[in-house]
């Protein structure tokens, strides 16, 4: 079945792979006196420069008959999976990984690759399975629970995600993304003190991150500390200060502080910047506010 799936994905030599998989007579390659085809290793050496150059279709055309001739060679199947990833054909790549994984040693890096591709393909449950398996095989690597947690958030498993992210943070306390995403989850749950604790750690590790700075500002605003929120955002570079995600935090903080003139000036400056840069998201956000309104 794996052979049929891969052949269908490649769109090449489908009939040949299906007939061989069903036990029909061998191709000319297996007949006495027939010319020997390239070995799996030879094919991989020939395909490698094609992959490096991004010649995806040529690589597929070379891999399809090689997979037919060597159906149990995991490296060929993995090469096909990676070619589809290079093309951005994530579902085909995911199918190819599923066909490749049973053919060789089970390793954490391969499950992590398969999990990443499944996530890109929108196969979130499958992605979770692979990242969980990667974590089981390599329990000291913080990246596996980090990525697992990110996908768990996508499917609404926020408690499981918190556990995964905390595991990642324990394994590597300098992993700013683990602390930052935990902070965002606590903010979403309105656990403001915990959110601020986690976000402060994330910002200490990665002080240049606007994402964590913005999340911390949101927590301060929600905690009725608009001045602290404003201090975090108002002096950012223009591209971040007038970003669609920053605008509502600044405008609402200025309204809470009853700084009407400053609020009006900010909205006008943000609108001019958004118009000059054709930032439709920022303009849509600004449309929610009326300059000068308390």
Image (cartoon, grey):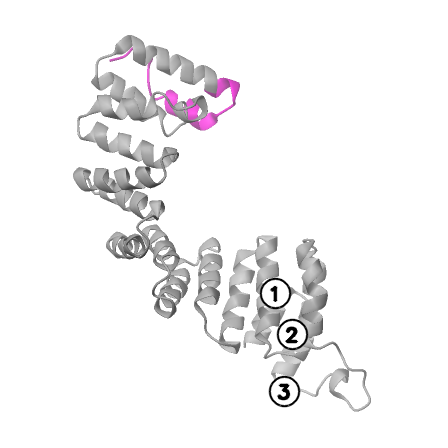
Q: Circle 2: is it few (<14), some (14-19), or many (20+) Cα within 10 Å?
A: many
- Name which residue lies at 40% across and 66% down: 134
Helix, strand or loop at label 3? It is loop
Real-space Cα separation, disc 3 to disc 1, in angstroms: 23 Å
In this rendering, the label closer to the viewer, 3 or 1: 1
Q: Residues within 10 Å of mark 3 (few under 14, many from 20)?
A: few
Q: Is residue 282 magenta?
A: yes
What residue sits right under mark 1 in the picture? 80
Q: How far is the residue under mark 2 from the one under mark 1?
A: 9 Å
In this view, the residue in front, 291 or 163, is 163
Give percent across and percent down for residue 181. Answer: 31, 45
Nearest to N terminus: mark 2 or mark 1: 2
Residue at label 2? 67
Q: Which residue is mark 3?
A: 23
Label 1 near label 3: C-beta < 8 Å?
Answer: no
Q: Nearer the viewer, residue 73 or 4?
A: 73
The residue segment tinted magenta is 274-294
């Amino acid at each position: 079945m794996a052979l049929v799936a891969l052949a269908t994905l490649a769109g090449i030599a489908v009939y040949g792979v299906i007939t061989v998989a069903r036990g029909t007579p061998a191709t000319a390659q297996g007949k006495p006196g027939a010319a020997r085809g390239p070995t799996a290793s030879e094919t991989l050496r020939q395909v490698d420069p094609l992959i490096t150059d991004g010649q995806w279709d040529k690589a597929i055309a070379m891999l399809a008959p090689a997979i037919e001739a060597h159906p149990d060679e995991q490296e060929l199947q993995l090469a096909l999976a990676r070619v589809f990833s290079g093309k951005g054909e994530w579902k085909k790549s995911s199918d190819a990984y599923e066909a490749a994984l049973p053919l060789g040693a089970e390793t954490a890096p391969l499950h992590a690759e398969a999990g990443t591709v499944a996530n890109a393909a929108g196969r979130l449950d499958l992605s979770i399975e692979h990242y969980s398996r990667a974590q089981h095989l390599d329990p000291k690597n913080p990246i596996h629970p980090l990525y697992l947690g990110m996908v768990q958030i996508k499917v609404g498993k926020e408690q499981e995600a918190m556990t995964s992210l905390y595991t990642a943070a324990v394994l590597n306390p300098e992993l700013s993304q683990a602390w930052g995403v935990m902070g965002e989850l606590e903010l979403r749950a309105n656990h403001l003190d915990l959110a601020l604790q986690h976000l402060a750690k994330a910002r200490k590790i990665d002080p240049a991150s606007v994402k964590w700075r913005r999340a911390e500002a949101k927590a301060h605003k929600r905690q009725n500390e608009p001045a602290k929120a404003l201090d975090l955002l108002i002096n950012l570079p223009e591209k971040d200060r007038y970003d669609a995600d920053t605008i509502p935090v600044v405008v609402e903080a200025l309204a809470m502080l009853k700084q009407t003139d400053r609020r009006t000036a900010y909205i006008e400056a943000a609108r001019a910047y958004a118009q000059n840069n054709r930032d439709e998201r920022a303009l849509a956000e600004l449309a929610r506010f009326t300059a000068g309104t308390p």
